[in-house]
Amino acid sequence: METLTFNQKLGRFIVNWIFLMLVWIMFTTTFASHEILIGLITTGLISLFSIRLFTCCNISILSPVKIFWMIWYLGVFTVALIKANLDVARRVISPELPINPGIVKFKTKLKTNYAKMVLANSITLTPGTLSIDIVDDTFYIHWIDVKTTNPEEAFKEIAEDFEKVLLKIF
């Protein structure tokens, strides 16, 4: 296990606490003072005991620039999600449309495991694609309609838009 400095632990604690507090507020759907106080205490304790387990990032992830790119990423993901849903729905409604399922691979420039996990989950959540494996910097993706087996072209079709933004966040 990695040894964390006090500042790293504090940064991870704060990031985790803020995230958990946002989740608390979403679930309680109230800003009543007693709910906020209980939430601060509960999420603070959870954050304290889970610094090493659940937090990937330090306090720099909360910089305004990175928050902007996270919001931008949600937009990029939403557009890709809508386009992929429409494509898969079209294939279901019109069974005569050809499908060409297969597995493609491509390399990523992302360095951290967390960034790779975000990319893999984004690909999996987009209908028509499924992340199968990640080996070092190579992704293996099941694609409902393989348009190319060329790794560079497959990357452009499946992951390029996601990776461009993720590189600015992580």
Image (cartoon, grey):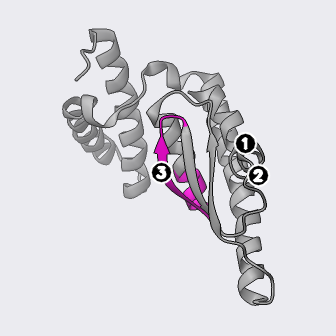
Q: Residues within 10 Å of mark 3 (few under 14, many from 20)?
A: few
Looking at the image, is 125 positioned above or below residue 20? below
Which of the two labelled residues, at mark 1 and mark 3, occupies the earlier sequence position? 3
Q: Is residue 148 visible?
A: yes
Give the quarter of the figure containing the C terminus. Answer: top right
CA distance for labels 1 and 3 = 18 Å
Q: Residue 91: x, y in percent?
A: 75, 81
Mark 2 sits on what residue? 157
Q: Are marks 1 and 3 in contact (CB under 8 Å)?
A: no
Q: Can you tell which of label 2 and label 3 is closer to the viewer? A: 3
Task: Give the distance between the C-alpha atoms of the residues marked 2 and 1, in whole angstroms.
Answer: 7 Å
The kind of residue tagged 2 is: Glu
Report the quarter where the N terminus lies: top left
At numbered mark 2, what does the secondary structure look like: helix, strand or loop? helix
- Give the number of the mark in front: 1 or 3: 3
| Along the line of sight, the residue nearer the viewer: 143 or 79 | 143
Name the residue tied to disc 1.
160
Mark 2 nearby-residue class (10 Å; few <14, some 14–19, many ≥20): few
Whether residues under marks 2 and 1 lie with C-beta atoms below 8 angstroms apart, the answer is yes
Determine the secondary structure under disc 3.
strand
**Residue drawn 28% across and 45% down?**
34
- Gap in Å between the C-alphas at discs 2 and 3? 18 Å
Element assignment for label 1: helix
Q: Is residue 127 visible?
A: no
Amino acid type of disc 1? Glu
**Sequence-earlier tag: 2 or 3:** 3
**Left/right of residue 11 with respect to residue 88 in the rendered view:** left
142 with respect to 43 (left or right): right
Foreground pick, 24 / 131: 131
The magenta-colored residue range is 121-137
